Amino acid sequence: MAVITSEQELRALYTMPNERAVKKQIAALDRHCIDFLALARFVVLSTCDEQGNMDASPRGGDAGFVKVIDENTLIVPDWAGNNRLDTFSNIIKTGRIGAIFLVPGIDEALRVNGTASLRTDEAFTSLCEVKGRYPKLV
């Protein structure tokens, strides 16, 4: 088995992506994305520190647990976890994030990449209330 060391070698193994695949990368959330997020019950948040060390952290909830503020802004509530805070530490360090959202029974995934910040203001945390409880941060 040979090790692939260039994009040229990699591309030689595969055909070019079809037009639909190329067009799925968009600059902001569209109606389809927003509708998908309303159904999503699971997301993996991927972050990195300044050295490029990666972290992938699962988050879940009822459909609609992720809130769409506008075409460029999502709110993901933080509920009790293991308190390692790797994802949050990386957000503080670099602000870089990638997320993949999944909906049970749908064989599509929504990828969202961008920047993130941590918020504790009530204007945001209050949007994520569940049974009288609010997340510490979003």
Image: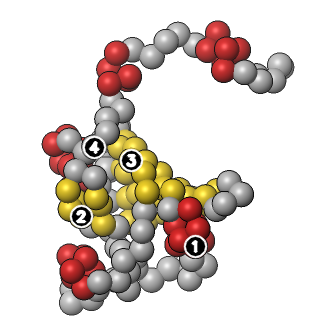
- Residue at 21 percent across and 80 percent down: it is 123
- Of the numbered discs 4 and 2, the one sitting upstream in the chain is 4
Q: Position of residue 60 (x, y in %)?
A: 38, 66
Q: Amino acid at mark 3?
A: Val
| Residues at marks 2 and 1 touching, judged by CB atoms closer than 8 Å | no
Residue matched to label 3? 112
* Horizontal arrangement in the rendering, residue 59 relative to residue 61 (left or right): right
In contact (CB < 8 Å): disc 3 and disc 4:
no
Estimate how packed mark 4 is, as few (under 14), some (14 to 19) or many (20 or more) residues with alpha carbons within 10 Å: few
Using the image, tell me which numbered label, if any, was put on residue 67. 2
Q: Nearer the viewer, mark 4 or mark 2?
A: 4
- Height in image: 117 above or below 37? below
Q: Residues within 10 Å of mark 3 (few under 14, many from 20)?
A: many
Q: From what the image shows, is residue 28 above or below residue 77?
A: above
- Above or below residue 35? Residue 49 is below
Residue located 35% across and 83% down the image: 120
* Residue pointed to by mark 4: 28
Residue at screen point 36% across, 77% down: 119
Q: Earlier in the sequence, mark 4 or mark 1?
A: 4
Query: Which of labels 3 and 4 is toward the front?
Result: 4
What type is the residue that disc 2 sits on? Lys
Select label 2 or label 1 by which is in front. 1
Q: Residue at x 66, y 60 (%)?
A: 50
Mark 2 is surrounded, within 10 Å at the Cα level, by few (under 14), some (14 to 19) or many (20 or more) other residues, namely some
From the viewer's side, name the closer residue of 25 and 84: 25
Image quarter of the N terminus: top right
The quarter of the displayed image where residue 61 is located: bottom left
The answer for how far apart the CA atoms under marks 3 and 1 are is 20 Å
Q: Can residue 64 be seen at all in this image of the molecule?
A: no
Q: Which mark is residue 89?
A: 1
Residue 55: where, in percent of width, then height? 61, 60
Q: Mark 4 or mark 3, which is nearer the start of the sequence?
A: 4
